[in-house]
Each structure stands twice: as C-alpha cells, then as structure tokens.
Image (tube, rainbow, N blue to C red):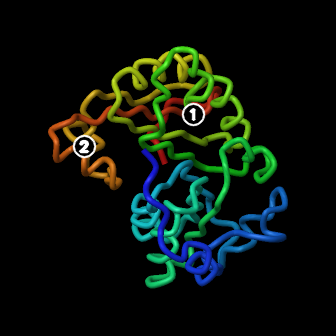
Amino acid sequence: MRPRKKHHLEERLAACEGCFLTGEALEQGRLRESFPNPQAPLHLEIGCGKGQFSYQMAQRHPEWNFIAMEREPNVMLDAAERLMAQPLPNLKLLLGDAEELPKLFLPGELARIYINFCDPWHKHRQYKRRLTYRERLKVYCNLLAPEGEIWFKTDNYMLYHFSLFEFDAVMNRYFTTTDLHASEYAADNVITEYEQRFTDLGQTIYAIRARKRGESPAAPI
C-alpha cells in the first residue's frame, strides 16, 4: 500500500533541491561530476526508500561516492530532508526508475549496486518486473566496473529463491545466506528501515552478493 502523500510535498522537495542530481548532471556519464571527489568509486542503491542505508554507508565510507535512487517522490522526501539537515558531500539523491540507468551511467562506471527489499512481484507472470530478473541483471552488469558487485537483501524467501537462479545465470555468487544477521557478513551489514521492522518481527534476512563474471574469486572490496 502506498504511503499517504505528505503535506506540501512539492514545496518541501524544492527546498531540498541541492541534494538531488538534476539538469546537466543527468547527462550520461556526468553524474560523478557533482561530487567533490569525482574520481572516487561510485556506488548506487536502487530503490533507496527513506535513504537510511545509503546515508549510513556514506558516513562509513567517505572514500566512496553514493547515489541513492528512488522513483517515489513521496518516499524520497525523508531522505532529502535528512540530507539537507545533515549534509554528506559523498551522497546524492536521484529521483528516477531503474529502467533509466543505461541513459545515466556509462558502461563500467559503477563499483557496486545495492538492491534492498525490492518489490517481490508475487505473481508468476510478473517475474520480469523483479529487479533481480536476469535480463535486468545483465543491464546492471554492463554498468559495473570489472570488479563490480551487486549486493541484494530481501525478507521474501520466494524472491530470494528466484534470485539465486537469476544471479547464477549472469554473475558469480560468492556469498549467499538465509540468515544475514547470523552470517560472517553481519558486522558490515547496514540495516535498512524495512530490515529493522522485519527483524523486530523475528523474520530472517536473505542475502546474495555477486561479482561481475570473469573476475577472480577474491575477497570483496
């Protein structure tokens, strides 16, 4: 169910304009020019929601640049107002849909892509809409650098099970778990808003980390 539209949404988003990538920055290959250190590795979260994950990642890793992408302005407002109140030079927001990625990024431009708790599209006939559908993964892989990775998290077992086969068709999986918080990667895991809610309800978190095919199975970045 969609959240109720926030009061004065357009005006509040306009007040946060400096947090967003807009105008010439949206020309293909120019997004990184908006960062003080444009040569830093570029990370992208698809479907950032209220932005907690990207914000905390940017805090932890000032040596990397982050773009938090969300298609729903009503949801993105929380991320924008947080970033306006406590700016981070290595984090920018992007209003848009994942379908637009090839028009925004050059091949090999991204170091890592994060997909956290995306819509599972439960009905079988909707499988092509899932962000981890193999044809979508191929698009993401084209945008990844040679050592680029995708990190995926979900609370939905069916989506997780589906994604295992999709990742195997396109990438090299090096980490898979049905309980992320009890795994060896728990310490470096940044918890999203949804993740905290599911964890509080006793739901385990499923996760996959995969590397662009053709690279050696070395430890992740």
- Specify which label sits upstream in the sequence, 1 or 2: 1
Q: What is the total number of numbered labels drawn onto the structure image? A: 2
Q: CA distance from mark 1 to mark 2?
A: 20 Å
Q: Which residue is mark 1?
A: 131
In the rendered image, the vertical position of residue 35 relative to residue 199, given as above or below: below
Relative to 214, residue 105 above or below: below
At a point 57% along the width and 15% down the height, the residue shown is: 125
Left or right: 74, with 56 as reference point: right
Three-letter amino acid code of the residue under disc 2: Phe
The residue carrying mark 2 is 198
SS of the residue under disc 2: helix
From this view, report whether residue 163 is shown above or below residue 77.
Answer: above
Tell me which residue sits at (61%, 31%) in the image. 215
**Could you say which quadrant of the image residue 179 lies in?**
top left
Q: Nearer the viewer, residue 174 or 83?
A: 83
Q: Is residue 18 left or right of 58 when viewed as pictured?
A: right
Residue 59 placement: quadrant: bottom left
Q: Quadrant of the N terminus?
A: top left
Q: Position of residue 198 (x, y in %)?
A: 24, 43
Q: Residues within 10 Å of mark 1 (few under 14, many from 20)?
A: many
Quick one: label 2, few (<14), some, or many (20+) residues within 10 Å? Answer: some
Left or right, 17 with reference to 158: right
Foreground pick, 115 / 209: 115
Q: What residue is at 55 percent from the left and 20 percent from the top? A: 166
Could you tell me which residue is drawn at 25 percent across and 51 percent down?
196
Residue 162, image x, y percentages: 46, 18
Amino acid residing under circle 1 = Leu
